Image (spheres, rainbow, N blue to C red):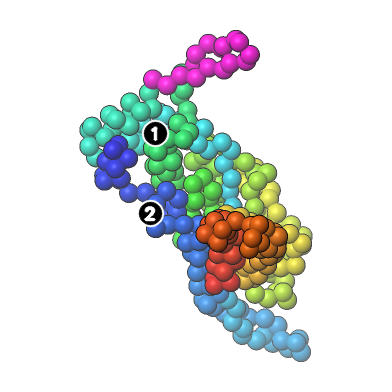
């Protein structure tokens, strides 16, 4: 009842893809692909020396896309109730605000080791895990962050639960990475002010391009490092041995999703082989039970692979 009332007076951010009806992880992946393809279809002019060495020649190049994946440490457990109370003050409806404040206040925790209990301590941070309201309160908590990050030109920020992805459009690394560093500095300042800790060791970045011959797509001398919370993170480029993962999906530098689709098909084939071993007409389960088992055991991987190829 309280959740219905909250959703009646407040709408989650459009760039938050979790905890919303008719929104899935596939939609966020599709939005990333749309942004990358849109940037590739937007060309800019550049003058390059001719092969003869005499004069310059005009070339057209597509814009590149930088993706930064930011990880928060224990995001749901770090929410400050004082900050959340200030955000709740902006929600219409006196009763709704009171209900939500009462839901957070008066909570205590203690630790039990063997037969001994510690003293009770008030819970001043975090949202109750397993509750219906918890995920939506977190979405409300990061609502101003998404407004802040999406206010910069050429920058798009999306979230799925506590997984933050920042998309930056640029002509080259020299153009995109300084913009990304500026946005990440704003993100770090907001995180410190709102008591959310960034985990740089789990942050990743990817540089999406089509050509392998453009030297500006590589930073071999380390002139444009990408810095998150004071730590430098590597940027996946063309020819890298590893891939970047977004919501469990492997992303290659061309964003063809061939690697992800191949992995999902391989996992599905392995499961189908296992199912054949138990699909005996006489000794095996009934067709209805087997069909139910197949849907839960293998169809999910097949659907993910089909979605990857479809993108």
- Name the residue nearer the viewer: 55 or 159: 159
Residue 12 is one of the magenta-drawn residues:
no
Q: Which residue is mark 1?
A: 84
Give whichever of discs 1 and 2 has the lower sequence position. Answer: 2
In percent of width and height, residue 238 lies at 71, 68
In percent of width and height, residue 237 lies at 70, 64
Q: Residue at x 30, y 45 (%)?
A: 7
Quadrant (top left/top right/bottom left/bottom right) for the N terminus: top left
Quadrant of the rendered image containing residue 113 = top right
**Residue 167 visible in rendering:** no
Task: Reply above or below: 133 against 290.
Answer: above
**Residue 311 visible in rendering:** yes
Residue 111 is one of the magenta-drawn residues:
yes
Left or right placement of residue 289 versus residue 275 in this view: left
Task: Reply above or below: 262 against 285.
Answer: below
Left or right placement of residue 19 versus residue 188 in this view: left
Few, some or many C-alpha atoms within 10 Å of disc 1 (few <14, some 14-19, many ≥20)? Answer: many
Label 1 sits on a secondary structure element that is helix
Q: Residue at x 67, y 81 (%)?
A: 48
- Name the residue nearer the viewer: 85 or 57: 85
Q: Residue at x 68, y 44 (%)?
A: 201
Label 2 sits on a secondary structure element that is loop
Q: Which residue is mark 2?
A: 21
- Name the residue nearer the viewer: 132 or 199: 132
Q: Residue at x 40, y 42 (%)?
A: 136
User: In the rendered structure, which segment of residues is drawn in magenta?
Assistant: 106-121
In percent of width and height, residue 59 lies at 62, 83
In percent of width and height, residue 245 lies at 63, 56
Quadrant of the rendered image containing residue 264 = bottom right
Single out the mark in the foreground, 1 or 2: 2
């Amino acid at each position: 009842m309280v959740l219905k009332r909250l959703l009646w007076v407040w709408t989650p951010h459009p760039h938050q893809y979790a905890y919303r009806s008719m929104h899935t992880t596939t939609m966020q992946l599709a939005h990333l692909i749309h942004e990358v393809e849109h940037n590739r279809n937007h060309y800019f002019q550049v003058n390059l020396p001719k092969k003869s060495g005499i004069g310059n020649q005009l070339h057209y190049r597509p814009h590149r896309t930088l993706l930064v994946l930011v990880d928060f440490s224990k995001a749901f457990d770090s929410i400050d109730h004082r900050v959340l109370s200030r955000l709740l003050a902006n929600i219409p409806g006196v009763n709704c605000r009171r209900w939500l404040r009462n839901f957070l206040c008066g909570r205590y925790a203690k630790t039990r080791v063997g037969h001994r209990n510690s003293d009770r301590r008030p819970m001043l941070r975090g949202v109750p895990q397993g509750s219906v309201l918890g995920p939506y309160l977190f979405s409300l908590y990061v609502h101003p962050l998404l407004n802040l990050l999406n206010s910069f030109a050429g920058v798009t920020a999306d979230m799925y639960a506590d997984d933050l992805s920042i998309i930056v459009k640029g002509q080259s690394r020299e153009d995109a990475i300084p913009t990304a560093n500026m946005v990440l500095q704003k993100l770090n300042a907001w995180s410190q002010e709102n008591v959310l800790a960034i985990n740089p060791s789990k942050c990743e970045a990817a540089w999406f391009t089509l050509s392998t011959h453009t030297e500006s797509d590589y930073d071999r001398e380390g002139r444009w490092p990408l810095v998150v919370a004071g730590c430098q993170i590597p940027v996946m480029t063309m020819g890298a041995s590893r891939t970047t993962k977004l919501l469990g999906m492997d992303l290659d530098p061309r964003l063809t999703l061939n690697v992800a689709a191949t992995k999902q098909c391989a996992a599905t084939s392995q499961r189908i082989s296992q199912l054949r071993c138990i699909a005996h007409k006489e000794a095996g389960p009934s067709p209805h039970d087997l069909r139910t088992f197949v849907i839960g055991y293998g169809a999910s991987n097949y659907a993910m692979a089909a979605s990857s190829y479809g993108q």
